[in-house]
Image (cartoon, rainbow, N blue to C red):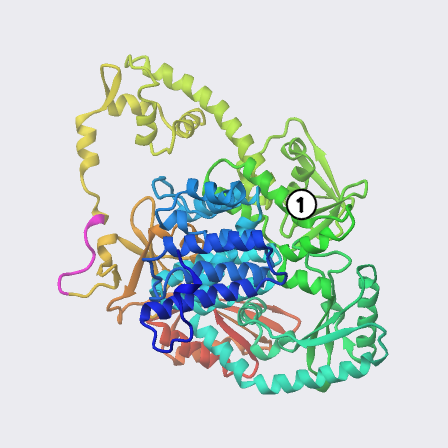
Amino acid sequence: MFIEADINPTNTEMTDDESERHLILQTYRHLLHSFKTPPDEKDLKMLRAAFDLAVEAHREQRRKSGEPYILHPIEVARICVEEIGLGPTAAVCALLHDVVEDTQVSLKDIHEQFGDRVALIVDGLTKLDGLHETESPQAENLGKVLRTMLSDVRVVLIKMADRLHNMRTIKSMPENKQKKIAAETSFIYAPVAHRLGLHKIKTELEDICFKIEHPDEYKDIARKLEEKRKLRGDYIEKFIQRLHEIFKDLEFPYRVLGRPKSIYSIWRKITTKHVSFEDIYDLFAVRVIIDVPKELEKRRSWDVYSFITDHFQPVPERLRDWITTPKSNGYESLQTTVLGLDNKFVEVQIRSERMNEIAERGFAAHWKYKNGGKKDDPDIYEKWLNRVRETIENSSGNAIELLADIRSELFTDEVHVFTPKGQMKTLPEGASALDFAFSIHSDLGCTCRAVRINNRVVPIHYKLKDGDQIEIIADKNQKPSEDWLQHVATSKAKNRIRSALKEEKRIQADFGKEIMERKLKSLRVPLEENCDMLAKWFGYHNRMEFLSAVYLGQVDPRQVNRNFRADGIYLVEKEEVKAVSAAPPRSFVPKNKVGVKPEIIINDEPGSYYQYSFAHCCNPVQGDSIFGFVLTQGGLKIHRATCPNANNLLAQYGHRVLNATWGNTSKSDFLTKIIVTGIDTGPGVIQQLTNRIYDLGINIRTFEISGEGGYFEGHLGLIVVNTDQLQRAILELRKFDWVSNVSRAD
C-alpha cells in the first residue's frame, strides 16, 4: 500500500522514486483540499482505499509524457470536485476509472470493495474490450457511457473530466493522434459539455481543439488579441468604473467582471458572419453579477438593464432574455450590447450569483439549487435525460445512428412553438413541422398530410420559428417515405420514420420472397439456403434489402437463371460468369510511373497503391494538412484536416483514417474555392477582382456573384498549384478597400 509514512518530504536529496512518490502524495492532498466541505471519516476512508488501489494497479504504467500514470486519475478526480462540483463518491470513481480497463483489477474486485454504485459507474467508464466487431468503436463506447448515464449521470460528468485532463496534456501525443482526439472531442464531448451547462469546460475544450485543428488561424487570432490586450484591458477597466458610478444607487450587492472571449468563439463569428476581427461586437464584454434572493432575480436584473441603458445606447436586435425563457441547458442570463465609451460596442451579461454558478458549473450546481427549491420547479436536465432515454430505447442498435440521434438532442438553440390550444412545445432549432407532429404523437406524425402554420398552409418540411402556432392535418392513408428522414431533426421523428420504413420494407420483402420462390422453382432449389448469397451477389447488405428490391423491380430475377446453375440444393455461379468477374479491374493498376515520386504518401507508401482520389467536400490543395479515409467500397479519399466532415470521420471512424502527406506535386493543378464579400461600388467590381486574379497567373474556373442593398458576395473557383499561391490570391484581394473579407470556402 502507498502510505504517507513512506515519504520524507523534508529530505532534499530524494531519489527519483522518492521524488515521484512525493509528487503523487502532494497531488492527492491537493484533491482532498479541493472539497468545499471536508469529507467525513467514512468518505475519507473510501477515498484513501481507492487511492491506494489505483496507485498499486497503475504502479508500472506511465503516460506518454513520461510521468507516473496515477497522476491522471488523481487529477480527473480533482476536476470532478473542484471544477464540476461533484462529491466524494464521484472522486472515488474517478480515481478508479481506468483500473478495470488498463490493469488486472476486475469489476468484481471493485464491487466487493466499494459496492454497487461505484461498480456501476466504473463499468460505465470502462471502454469495450475490443473483442466486439464494430464499425465505429468510438460511437460504441460513447453509447455505453450514455446508457450508463441514465442510471447515474455522474458517469458522463466524470467522462468529461477525463477528457478535459487528456486534452490539457495532449501535447505529448503524436500529431496524427492529437487530430483524431481533437476531432472526437469537438464532435462529441464539447456539445455534451455545453448541453450539461459546463460552460468553462466546453470553452476550454473548443479552444484546445481549435488550436490543434486550425493552428495558423489560432495563432493569428491569439496574436491579435495579445496586441490589443492592454488596450482592451484599459478600456474594460474604464467601462467598469463607469458602471460603478451608474450603480451607486443600487440597493443590493453586485460585482462586475471583465469577460474574455474565447479564441474559438471569435473565429466562429469571423467565419460564419464573414466579418473581420475588428468588426466583432463583443470583443469587449463584461458581466454584472447581482446577489439577490431567487424570487427577486428577474426584477433586479431588469433594474440593472434599465440603469445601463439609461446611460448607454442599446442595440435592440442584440437583446437576449434567457431569464424569462432559459436555454435548454439551464443557462439563464439577460444579455445585451450597448454603444459604450468612445462609441465602442460592449456586450453586457446580467445574471445572479445562482445563475452564474449554474452557467459556469452546470449540472452539479443546478442540482444544488434544485434541492433547495420548490418541488414543482421545472427540471430541465431530467427532461433532457428523458429525451436521451427515449432515443436510446427507440434506437435501432446501430451505434453510429444512435450517436447521430443523441447529437441532435445536444443542440442548445431551440424554438418555442404552440399547439392550436395554446400549449407550448420546445423543439431543437432546425426542427420542421413534421418534427412537431411526431412530438405530439407518433401516429400523428406518420399520417401527417399537410400543415397549417399561423392559419397558412405550408409544406410538411417547413422549418419552425419561435412563436409559430401549428395545426397538423392528418390522413389515415398517408405513410412515411424515405425522403422524410431528410426533413426531420429530432431523434423521435427519425426513429419512428425508420421503424415505419422497416415495416413497409418487411411487407415488400414478403412479396419479393414469393416472386423469388416462384423463379427458383425452375431450378429446383430452395430460396432459404441461397437468399443471403444472392443478396451479396446483387450488391445488397442483407436479404430484406434484396427481397424488397425484387418486389420494387430493382432486381431482375431472370439474371439468376442466366448466371447460376443448380448444384443439389445450392446455386453455383456458372464458370463463364466466374471467369469474367475474376478479371482484375483496370483501376487497380498503379498510377505512378517508376522512378517518379507519387503525389501522395500514405503511411510511408505510394498513395497509388491505395487508388486514392481527392474529396470534393473540401478540395485539398498541395500544402494543406491532409489525411486519408478508407472507403467501405474500396479505395481512399484524401481530405483536408480542416474539411467540414473531418470531425465526423475522425471521431466516428478513426480506425479507417490513415496518415497522408504530400509528395512531388509541383506541376499539379488543384481546384479550390474562395468567398469574397464587400461593398458593391457599381460597375467594375467583377473586372477588378478577375484582373487581380489573372495578374497572379491563376485561372478562374467558376465565378458567381450576387448582392443587394450595396453589398455583394462572390464565389470564385480557382485553379492553383499550392496553398502559397492560394494565400497570395486571398491577400491581394483583401487590398481593395471595398472588400470586407476574403476566405477559403469549405
Comparing 411 with 481, the one in front is 411
Say whether residue 470 is magenta: no
The quarter holding residue 661 reads bottom left
Query: Where residue 204 sits: x, y (%)?
Result: 53, 66
Q: Amino acid at mark 1?
A: Lys
Q: Is residue 562 above or below residue 451?
A: above
- Residue 447 falls left or right of residue 241: left
Q: Residue furthest front?
A: 5
**Does residue 423 appear anywhere in the picture?**
yes
Q: Secondary structure at mark 1?
A: helix
Q: Which residue is mark 1?
A: 383
Q: What residue is drawn where x is 37% and y is 76%?
A: 725
Query: Where residue 286 sits: x, y (%)?
Result: 68, 75
**Does residue 717 appear anywhere in the picture?**
no
Query: Where residue 123 sits: x, y (%)?
Result: 46, 44
Q: Is residue 743 above or below residue 735?
A: above
- Residue 737 falls left or right of residue 178: right
Q: Residue furthest left?
A: 594
Within-10-Å neighbours for mark 1: few <14, some 14–19, many 20+ = few
The quarter holding residue 477 reads top right
Q: Is residue 294 above or below residue 104?
A: below
Query: Where residue 371 sits: x, y (%)?
Result: 72, 51
| Magenta stretch in the rendered image | 588-595
- Residue 264 falls left or right of residue 21: right
Of the 4 image quadrants, the one containing the N terminus is bottom left
Assign the magenta stretch its main secondary structure.
Answer: loop
Q: Is residue 546 above or below residue 457?
A: above
Q: What residue is drawn where x is 68% and y is 34%?
A: 441
